[in-house]
Image (cartoon, rainbow, N blue to C red):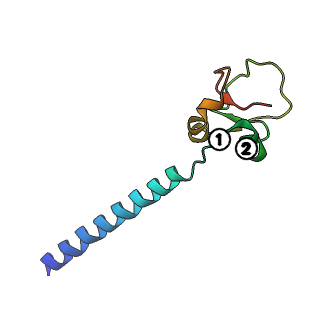
Amino acid sequence: MKKILNICLVAGLLLTLSVATLNTASAESKVKTYKNCTELNKDYKGGVAISSSTKNKGGKTKYKPYVSKELYNANKKSDRDKDGIACEK
């Protein structure tokens, strides 16, 4: 009886770990990489900032940027002035 209980417990733990790993992998793959700022600004008018405390070096902007570290890192190439905000408008 103890053997069956231990086997069920181990199987349950393995199943939980595998589901958690799949959820993490699918969340990481959902970050979209845009080919240019025109495409990114269609979805995020103010661009994408790496953090909420990031300050714009380029001066005043029309729109507030969307804050997402993962999305910024995927589109880092579009941050021309390297201020932590990609495609600010």
**Residue closer to the observer: 47 or 52:** 47
**Residue drawn 86% across and 31% down?**
62
Rendered image quadrant of residue 24: bottom left
Q: Which residue is mark 1?
A: 35
What residue appears at the point 65 percent right and 41 percent down from the top-left corner? 35
CA–CA distance in space, label 1 to label 2: 7 Å
Q: Secondary structure at mark 2?
A: helix
Where 41 falls versus 83 (above or below)?
below
- Judged from the image, the secondary structure of the residue bearing numbered disc 1 is loop
Q: Is 27 placed left or right of 57 in the picture?
A: left
Q: Circle 2 is placed at which residue position?
A: 39
Query: Which quadrant of the figure contains the N terminus?
Result: bottom left
- The residue sitting at the right extreme is 62
Q: Seen in the image, is 4 located left or right of residue 66?
A: left
- The kind of residue on which mark 2 rests is Glu
Q: Is residue 8 left or right of residue 26?
A: left
Numbered tag placed on residue 85 in the rendering: none
Q: Nearer the viewer, residue 53 or 82?
A: 82
Q: Position of residue 15 (x, y in %)?
A: 33, 68
Neighbour tally class for label 1: few under 14, some 14-19, many 20 plus, Cα within 10 Å: few
**Residue 56 image offset from top left, x and y in percent:** 73, 22
Q: Position of residue 75 (x, y in %)?
A: 61, 36
Crowd around label 2: few <14 · some 14–19 · many ≥20 (10 Å)? few
Q: Name the residue nearer the viewer: 87 or 3.
A: 87
Kind of residue at badge 1? Lys
Q: Is residue 5 above or below residue 22?
A: below
Residue for point 18% across, 72% down: 6
Location of the C terminus (image quadrant): top right
Total labels: the figure holds 2
Quarter assignment of residue 48: top right
Mark 2 and mark 1 in contact (Cβ < 8 Å)? yes
